Amino acid sequence: MSHQMDMEFLEKAIAKQDADLESTEQETMSEKIYEEMDEEVIPLCRALNGLDGITTVESCCGHGDRPFGIWFIADNVDDVAPVCYFADDCHTECPGWSVTVMTDCMMSPVKYLLEGPKGELGYAAAGIMAELIGDYVAWGVPEDTSTRPSDR
């Protein structure tokens, strides 16, 4: 092996090692973040983060006293469509969910709130929604979107 080939091999090996380390650090950081979250929100946050262009930034299960809530940002407004789709109870049979657009008095960049029912109803519905969103991420657009009576 020539010196040039040795250097190229070494540079590639170092780059791969750095990429692997960065990936491991990101996974470790993500797991630490999930450890600090209310356990009831974790499946739905993971599912939302699996959607293209969606990043969750805050969450609270409501602890039985307040509504279930997950705040998120979107790369563009079209990326919010799947979240709105699954918040609609005609697609999930989980009533009481909404998506709200928010900013503050300083007109900070927009963030969204996915909000659902309080307590056990919210926790159960969040699990159902997480599973449906996971299926959507894996398999694509649900087939039954055109069969609703309101779409005829």
Image (cartoon, rainbow, N blue to C red):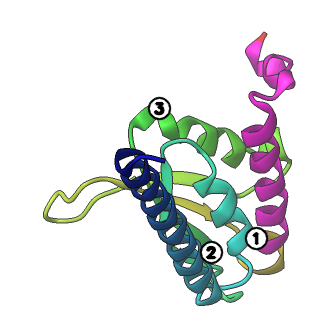
Label 1 residue SS: helix
Viewer-nearest of discs 2 and 3:
3
Query: Is 49 left, or right, of 12 in this rendering?
Result: right
Regarding residue 92, the answer to whether it shows in the image is: yes
Depth check, front residue: 98 or 14: 14
71 to the left or right of 133 = left
Q: Residue at x 20, y 59 (%)?
A: 108
33 shown above or below 142: below
Which residue in the protein does label 1 denote? 122
Q: Amino acid at mark 1?
A: Gly
Dot placed on the residue nearer the N-terminal end, 2 or 3: 2
**Residue drawn at the location 66% of the way across and 63% of the way down:** 46
Q: How many marks?
A: 3
Q: Residue furthest left?
A: 106
State how far apart marks 2 and 3 are (Cα).
Answer: 25 Å
Q: Which residues are magenta?
A: 122-151
Question: Residue 28 lies in magenta, yes or no?
Answer: no
Indicate which label's residue lies in the foreground, 1 or 3: 3
From mark 1 to mark 2, how far is it between C-alphas? 8 Å
x, y percent for residue 109: 25, 54
Q: Residues within 10 Å of mark 1 (few under 14, many from 20)?
A: many
* Mark 1–mark 2 CB contact (< 8 Å): yes
Residue 78: assigned label? 3
- Residue 72 vs residue 125, the one in the foreground: 72
Placement of the C terminus among the 4 image quadrants: top right
- Residue type at numbered disc 2: Pro
Pick the front one: 59 or 120: 59
